[in-house]
Amino acid sequence: MRLTMLCARDGEDAAKEWARAAVQLYRQSLANPGHFASQSDWKPRFELSVRELATFAEQGTIVNGIP
């Protein structure tokens, strides 16, 4: 939903840049043992978001209408 809104408001290129930045931030969070994203109950959600955002950043495809 956020990517759809960003595409409509700012254009696909800007949405792809946001997705790339979010991927970097999420990967850093996953690698940090002190961050909740690295905890077992949150890690799969962040990993899924990373895959979906990376797909959008590379292909412009919003996977499953998420995120």
Image (cartoon, rainbow, N blue to C red):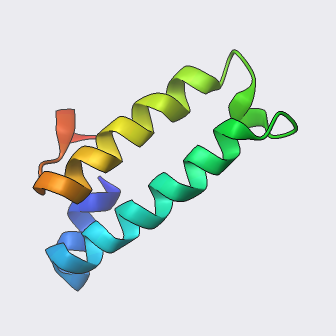
Going by the image, does 44 lie left or right of 64? right
- Residue 46 vs 17, above or below: the answer is above
Q: Quadrant of residue 39?
A: top right
Q: In the image, residue 9 lies at what x, y percent?
A: 23, 81
Tell me if residue 67 can be seen.
no
- Residue 21 vs 8, above or below: the answer is above
Question: Which residue is at a point 11% across and 53% down the rendered structure image?
Answer: 59
Foreground residue among 3 and 55: 55
Foreground residue among 2 and 12: 12
**For the view shown, which residue lies furthest in the right direction?**
34
Q: In the image, residue 43 lies at what x, y percent?
A: 62, 25
Tell me if residue 13 can be seen.
yes
Q: In the image, residue 57 lies at what x, y percent?
A: 25, 58
Q: In the image, residue 41 lies at what x, y percent?
A: 68, 16
Going by the image, does 7 lie left or right of 28? left
Placement of the C terminus among the 4 image quadrants: top left
Going by the image, does 45 lie left or right of 36? left
Foreground residue among 9 and 45: 45
The tally of labels here is: 0
